[in-house]
Image: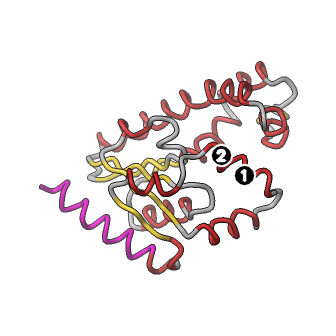
Amino acid sequence: MIVLGLTGSIGMGKSTTARMFLEEGVPVHDSDEAVHRLYSGIAAPLIEARFPGTVVDGTVDRERLGKAVLGNPDALRDLERIVHPLVRADSESFLARHREAGAPLVVLDIPLLFETGGRERVDRIVVVTAPAEVQRERVLARPGMTEEKFAAILARQVPDAEKRNAADYVIDTGAGMDAARQAVRSLIAELAGKSGG
């Protein structure tokens, strides 16, 4: 089974690209979706213990949590110490299930793959990219996003150019969805050939 790591900076079209893999029948483990589940499950009491007042009705309130950690590197590190191992365990059970089912290819959608040392967990890396002005436009169109927040997020991410240089494959979503979908299909075909051999 080939484990393909999918990553890309904020606003590059990673989630859309992950959906394209799913639509082509490739199992995808979405780290963001896993965090969402964990925030309503086992992570909630752990986060509440460290950041009191951030859990409402058994679910982490992302806005309250954001206020507690934004601009506070120590708090952010504490949050990552709670969340990252849980997401990792979730992805390990995903891999085990699909390995047992005989899947030839799976995708681990890891937003901070390079930042969190996720390289050793995958066989190949695909980086989703787009021109900087397209990225900026997409991100600033998000509800509640500000120039300041965008700058803070970018500061924590490995620069796009470095990610592309370290990638095995690059998918450019700036050229439109049809081109991106075609790139996904070509990549699946190429990797299917490799897993068959």
Chain part drawn in magenta: 180-197
Instruction: Tell me if 51 is positioned left or right of 79 in this view.
Output: right
Secondary structure under tag 2 reads: helix
Q: CA distance from mark 1 to mark 2?
A: 6 Å
Indicate the quadrant containing the C terminus: top left, top right, bottom left or bottom right. bottom left
Q: Which residue corresponds to the image point at 29% horizontal and 40% vertical from the top-left?
A: 100
Q: Which residue corresponds to the image point at 65% horizontal and 50% vertical from the top-left?
A: 154
Q: Residue 8 appears at what percent x and percent y? A: 52, 55
Instruction: Tell me if 100 is positioned left or right of 164 in this view.
Output: left
Q: Residue 80 appears at what percent x and percent y? A: 63, 30
Secondary structure under tag 1 reads: helix
Label 1 with label 2: CB-CB less than 8 Å: yes
The image's mark for residue 113 is none
Q: Which residue corresponds to the image point at 38% horizontal and 76% vertical from the top-left?
A: 182
The image's mark for residue 155 is 2
The image's mark for residue 151 is 1
Compared with residue 156, is residue 85 higher up or lower down, i.e. above or below? Answer: above
**The stretch drawn in magenta includes residue 192:** yes
**The stretch drawn in magenta includes residue 60:** no
Compared with residue 150, is residue 90 higher up or lower down, i.e. above or below? Answer: above
Which secondary structure class fits the magenta region best?
Answer: helix
Q: Label 2 sits on what residue type?
A: Ala
Q: Residue 165 appears at what percent x and percent y? A: 39, 55
In depth, the one of 48 and 153 nearer the eye is 153
Compared with residue 2, is residue 16 higher up or lower down, i.e. above or below? Answer: below
